[in-house]
Image (cartoon, coloured by chain):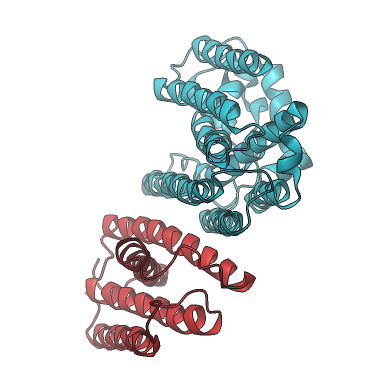
Chain colours: A cyan, B red
């Protein structure tokens, strides 16, 4: 029930924020957000403390990989920065600049943390312990969702983040996370956690599903790099026009979001799209 | 592009070819020998931790390499700095390097899995490694030819 309420609130907030924006918010992003929430709901229902490793793994793929990917593609932080009143947006931007947030959105931190969480879950008997404790299982599910989201967000960099790493480092972090996932799946195949059934199929599902979603993430990452390079060159070819945010996808160091720049637009709540994109850079 | 190719483009061309070559060889290995022939096993329960880690890294790295190589290739084509001979040479070199690593380090040193089970693997191993050497030699030859000819 708490889960359902949380999902409905998240869906409502996002739709309301998109509505609220005077500059039109892409429908595809709203669809991605809603679909992502549906994945999270289904994943949490399937993936709780389960004896059947197949259902558990299907749930975790939805909750920790596919759901987060769809949520990240919906760019919720960008929407929040646009829809919030200026003071709120400024506060959010300040929050994004804090050392903790910087840390959490660094792929070289977020991806290893995500993998480490899985290793702790299956390597230490936590999975078995959670089977009989609903509260613990809920905490584990929440952790899988949050760490999956942070890792995907850090790799893809859809939302503005200070000090973005280069595309090579992010692709390497993704590959390393994928490798850790593969190795863990094979270890589970060989020695499943105590008290689980259908362990071999579950481990195969973890391996294959993880590969497919990771490949999708890699494809999105490189696609964004390809598009951002075209934008950067176009900007460079026409001197006088600002180079479109290299930091968005391909850049080395995305500058800090600075909503303070749009104090002039204080009257229109969402600002013109030009002012907002400047603020987001 | 006429005349000189700027160095970053040359490096990008090499990176694209090497990544795609190694990645595709890994994918062929995975699809043909694991999925179609079932010569290799998903996990034969006999390999140690180092073998498992190597296998996982290889699987993730090859797939990531294919995606990255394709993206770099698309960028080269768009900028018209694509030189086919050099690129194919890099593909062959990448494929050969992967095959050599798979045959020597994975199969023999780490003993992740063998080429085929239930038969004497020596012949298969020789074929595997000879294939790698042929690929590497072809790549090196092609690269030398591309070097001799002036860049378009």
**Residue A179 in the image: x percent, y percent?**
55, 59
**Residue A209 in the image: x percent, y percent?**
47, 45
**Residue A138 in the image: x percent, y percent?**
71, 28
For residue B11, above or below residue A277? below
Q: Give the quadrant of residue B30.
A: bottom left
Q: Quadrant of the N terminus of chain B?
A: bottom left
For residue B13, above or below residue A16? below
Nearest the camera: A28 or A259? Answer: A28
**Residue A85 in the image: x percent, y percent?**
65, 14
| Residue at 60 percent of width and 33 percent of height | A47
Q: Give the quadrant of residue B10.
A: bottom left
| Residue at 52 percent of width and 51 percent of height | A200
| Residue at 67 percent of width and 26 percent of height | A260
| Residue at 34 percent of width and 58 percent of height | B70
Q: Give the quadrant of residue A95.
A: top right
Q: Quadrant of the C terminus of chain B?
A: bottom left
- Number of numbered callouts drawn: 0
For residue B23, above or below residue B131? above
Nearest the camera: A188 or A147? Answer: A188
Nearest the camera: A121 or A49? Answer: A49
């Amino acid at each position: 029930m708490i889960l359902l309420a949380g999902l409905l609130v998240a869906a409502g907030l996002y739709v309301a924020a998109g509505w609220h924006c005077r500059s039109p918010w892409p429908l595809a992003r709203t669809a991605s957000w809603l679909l992502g929430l549906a994945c999270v709901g289904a994943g949490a229902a399937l993936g709780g403390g389960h004896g059947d490793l197949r259902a558990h793994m299907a749930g975790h793929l939805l909750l920790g990989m596919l759901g987060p990917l769809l949520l990240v593609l919906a760019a919720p932080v960008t929407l929040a920065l646009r829809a919030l009143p200026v003071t709120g947006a400024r506060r959010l931007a300040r929050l994004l600049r804090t050392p903790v947030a910087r840390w959490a959105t660094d792929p070289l931190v977020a991806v290893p943390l995500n993998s480490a969480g899985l290793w702790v879950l299956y390597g230490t008997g936590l999975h078995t312990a959670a089977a009989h404790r609903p509260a613990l299982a809920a905490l584990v599910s929440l952790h899988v969702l949050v760490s999956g989201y942070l890792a995907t967000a850090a790799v893809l960099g859809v939302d503005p983040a200070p000090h973005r790493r280069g595309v090579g480092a992010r692709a390497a972090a993704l590959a390393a996370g994928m490798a850790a996932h593969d190795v863990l799946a094979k270890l589970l195949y060989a020695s499943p956690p105590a008290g689980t059934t259908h362990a071999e199929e579950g481990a195969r599902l973890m391996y294959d599903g993880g590969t497919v979603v990771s490949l999708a993430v890699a494809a999105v990452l490189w696609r964004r790099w390809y598009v951002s390079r075209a934008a950067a060159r176009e900007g460079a070819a026409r001197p006088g026009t600002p180079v479109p945010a290299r930091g968005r996808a391909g850049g080395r160091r995305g500058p800090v979001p600075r909503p303070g720049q749009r104090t002039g637009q204080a009257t229109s709540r969402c600002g013109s799209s030009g002012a907002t994109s400047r603020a987001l850079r | 592009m006429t005349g000189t190719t700027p160095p970053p483009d040359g490096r990008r061309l090499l990176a694209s070819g090497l990544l795609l070559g190694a990645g595709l060889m890994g994918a062929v290995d995975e699809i043909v020998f694991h999925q179609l022939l079932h010569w290799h096993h998903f996990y034969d329960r006999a390999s140690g931790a180092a073998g498992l880690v190597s296998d996982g890294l290889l699987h993730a790295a090859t797939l990531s390499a294919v995606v990255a190589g394709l993206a770099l290739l698309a960028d080269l084509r768009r900028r018209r700095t694509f030189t086919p001979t050099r690129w194919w040479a890099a593909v062959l070199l990448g494929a050969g390097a992967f095959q050599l690593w798979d045959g020597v380090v994975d199969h023999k040193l780490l003993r992740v899995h063998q080429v085929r089970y239930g038969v004497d693997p020596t012949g298969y191993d020789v074929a595997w490694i000879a294939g790698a050497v042929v690929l590497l030699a072809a790549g090196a030859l092609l690269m030398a030819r591309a070097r001799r000819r002036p860049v378009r």
